[in-house]
Image: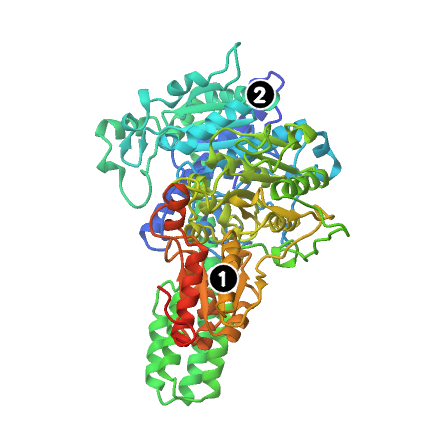
Amino acid sequence: MAQSGENKKNLTKEELSFEDFKKIVLNDYHIANESREASLTGRKEVLTGKAKFGIFGDGKEVAQIAMAKVFREGDFRSGYYRDQTFMFATNNLTLQEWFAGLYGHTDVDAEPMSAGRQMGGHFGTRSLNPDGTWKDLMKIKNSSSDISPTGGQMPRLLGLAMASKYYKINPELQSEKFQKFSNKGNEVAFGTIGDASTSEGLFWETINAAGVMQIPMLVSVWDDGHGISVPKKYQTTKESISEVLKGFQRDETGKGYDIFKTKGWDYAHLCETYEKAIKVCREEHVPVIVHVEEVTQPQGHSTSGSHERYKSQERLAWEQEYDPLKKMREWIIESAIATEEELNQIETDAKQAVKTAKSAAWTAFLSPIKTELREVAALFDELAAESSNADFIQKSKNDLNAVLDPVRRDIVTSVKNILRLTRDENLPSKQKLVDWLNLSNITNYDRYNAYLYSQSAQAIANIKPVAVQYGSEEITKDGRELLRENFDAILSKYPEVLIFGEDSGKIGGVNQGLEGLQKKYGEHRVFDTGIREATILGQAIGMSMRGLRPIAEIQYLDYLLYAVQIMSDDLATVQYRTKGGQKAPVIIRTRGHRFEGVWHSGSPMGMIINSLRGINICVPRNMTQAAGFYNTLLESDEPALVIEPLNGYRLKERLPENFGAFKISLGMPEVIREGTDVTVVTYGSCCRIAMEAAKFLEETGISMEIIDVQTLLPFDIQNTIVESVKKTNRVIFFDEDVPGGASAFMMQKVLEDQGGYQYLDSAPRTLTAKDHRPAYSSDGDYYSKPSADDVFDMAYSIMSEVEPGKFPAIY
C-alpha cells in the first residue's frame, strides 16, 4: 500500500518543490484509489459469502486523506466505521489487515484491531504491550477502538481531548512517568461522525461540554445527506449541522468553537481547511468543527441494502458527477500535476494491490482452519478403522471435506456428531478425538472469549488485600468523613487521579464525601461538571485511555441509566473487543438504595450486572469497605462501579489509621454473622436490615447466618457461600432489586454454579422489592422494599415448615 506523505510542509509553501508537491498529491491519489477499490471488492466478498457483512468508506476518501495530513503521533481518534481511508493514510492499517477484519481473522497479528471480534469498519490501534503494560503513546498515531452505536464515539472523544487539558495545566503530570502519555498536553483528539448521527443526544451533550471546557477536540462531520434512507431534512434543523451550531461559534465576547465548512470532493480546499482547523485547535486549545458537505456514498449504506431504493435519479447522477476520486482526478489533470496516463497507472496499481492483499488475507484466514480440518480428517480415518460405525464416520468426513469454505463451527459440529454416534464405543482412537475437541475448546476460548477482564499483572485477581489498621483508641466518625480522609490520601498518592461529577467540586459532593478537597488540591483535580451523565462517563473513558485515573461520580444510582449505554457498549467491552489491545480503568462512584420516593431509591441491580459484564460491580455495606475498594481498584487496570450505601454517610464507623493503603479483595464474601439454621445471602444496605432481623429471630430460637457478598461482579470466586448452605441446609437470597433481578443472579451462582441445590432441606427463597418503584415516605419504603420484618417472616416461615411444633404460625 502507498505510504502517506508526512505533513512537514504546507502544500502552498513556496519552498516545496513541484516534484515533492507532485509526489504528495499522487501518493494521496494512490491511497484514495486503494481505499475505493477495497470498498468495491469488500462488497463483492460479502455478496459471495466469504464475509458476513460490510460497511465501507467509499465517498469519504479525499476528505479523510486531508484530515490524516494534520494527525500527529500522540494524537487520538475516536471515530466512525467509515474511516478506513484515514486509517490507511496514517499507516495504522494495511490493506491485508483490512481484509482480515472483513473475514473475522482471529489472529491478533493478522488483524490487530480486534482479532476478528468486530465486523469490518471498526478500527483501533494497540495501546498496550502483550503483557498489558502501556506502550509509548507519544510514538503512535492513536485510534481508540470503535463501537457501532451511532454517536457512541462522542463521549469518549470528550475524555480523550480533556486529557490534553489536564496534562497541560497540571505540572505533576509533566514528569518522566507521564511522558509516554502526553507532551504537556499538545495532542489533539479527532472525532468523526456521520451527519445523520449528529441527531443523537450524545453528540449534543459532547459538543456542549467541550465548548464549556475549551479543549483541543477536532470534530469532522461527514455529510452525505442521508441517515441510511432518511434524508437530512428529517434529521437536522435547517438541513445543516453547521448552520444549527452557529450559536457555538466563538467570538470576542466568549468561548466557543471555530466552525469550518468544506466539500468532500474538493481536495485542495479540504487540505487548506484542515490546516487552518488544526492550527486553532492545537495551538489555542479551542474545539473545532469541520463540516464536510457534499459527500457521496457510491455503494449506499451497507451490504444489507441498495441506495437506489431511496435516492432519486437526480441524486444518483449528482453523486456520480461529484465522486471525490473523479473530482480529484480532474483537478490533478487541470492543474497539470500529472498526465492521464500516470493516473491510469496509479488506478491499475491500486486494483492490483487490493487484489493481492485480498488473496493474502483470505489464504491466511483459511490456512489454520484447513490445518484443523486435516487433523480431524486423519482422526476420523483412525476411528473409522476401529469403529462399527465406519460408514457413518466416512460420510461425515466426506460431507465436511465438501464444504467449500469451512469454518471452525463446521469442524466442531462434525466432531461432536461422530462422538455422539460412537458414544457406546470405548476406543483409543475415539479418545484421541475427544482430546482434540478438548484442546480445541481451550484454543477457541482464547480466540472468542478471553479478555473480558484484564489478563495483566494488574488484574483485580492479582491485587493482594491489606488489612485495615486501627489505633489503640477507638475513634468513630461519620462514614462521609471516613471516605473524605481516604480520598485525601488517594489524591496525595496518585497525581493522575482526578475526581469529578455533578456537585463534586466546590461543595464536595451532595453527601460531603469530598468536602474541602477541591480547595486543597485545586480545580484541576477535584471539579464539577454539568448535568450530563453520559459524557461524565465518556470523559472518564477517554482520560483513562491516556494514562489518567479518573473517578467519575454519578450522583445517584438511578442516574446511571443515562450512562448505561456508554458503560455497556464502550467501557465494558474495551478489553474484550480489542483482545487486550486497549484498556480504560475507569472508577465510577455512585450511591443508592433505601431512599424514599419513586426517584433516587431504585436498585436496578439486575440491569446493571447483566448489561455491564466486563466492569467490576462493588456493593459495599459501609464506607470503610467502599474506601478499601477504591484503594484496590487504583492498583488495578480494570474498570469498576462502586455503589456506596446512601444511608451510610451519617452512620458512625471506626476510624482507620492507614487511609489509602488498606485494600479489600473483590469476589470474596464475608460472613458478618454466624448462624446454624438459615443462610441469608445479601449485600449493601440490606446487610444492616438482615442484622436487625437476626436479633429478632434469635429471640425465637432461630440462628441466622448472614453473608455479605461484597461484590456482585466478580461473585464469590472461591465458592465459599456453598459452605454455609452445607451447614444450614436453608438459604434466602435477599436484596432490594425487583423480583428476578440480583436475587435470581445470586441464586443461580450459589445453587447451580456452586452446586448448592444438593444440600438444601427446604426450598430456596428470594426476598426482593415489589415490581414497582418505591412509594414516597417511610411507609412507602416499608411497603415497597423488604424490611427487617420481611426478613424475619421469611426465615421464620421456613423454620415453621421444618418444625411447626417449635415454630407455630404467628399471623
State the residue at coordinates (45%, 77%): 758
Disc 2 target residue: 279
State the residue at coordinates (48%, 28%): 219
- Judged from the image, the secondary structure of the residue bearing numbered disc 1 is helix
**Which of the two discs, 2 and 1, labels the residue nearer the N terminus?**
2
Residue toward you, 61 or 210: 210
- Judged from the image, the secondary structure of the residue bearing numbered disc 2 is helix
Q: Position of residue 205 (x, y in %)?
A: 44, 30
Q: CA distance from mark 2 to mark 1?
A: 71 Å
Q: How many marks?
A: 2
Residue toward you, 181 or 110: 181
Residue 341 in view of the camera? no
Which numbered mark, 2 or 1, is in the foreground of this view?
Answer: 1
Kind of residue at badge 1? Phe
Q: Are marks 2 and 1 in contact (CB under 8 Å)?
A: no
Q: Is residue 15 above or below residue 661?
A: above
**Left or right side of 691 for 247:** left
Q: Is residue 48 above or below residue 373?
A: above
The disc placed on residue 57 is none
Q: Position of residue 740 (x, y in %)?
A: 37, 58
Disc 1 target residue: 696
Residue at the right extreme, as displayed: 472
Q: Residues within 10 Å of mark 1 (few under 14, many from 20)?
A: some
Residue toward you, 168 or 1: 168
Task: Name the quarter where the C terminus is drawn.
Answer: bottom left
**Left or right side of 294 for 68:** right
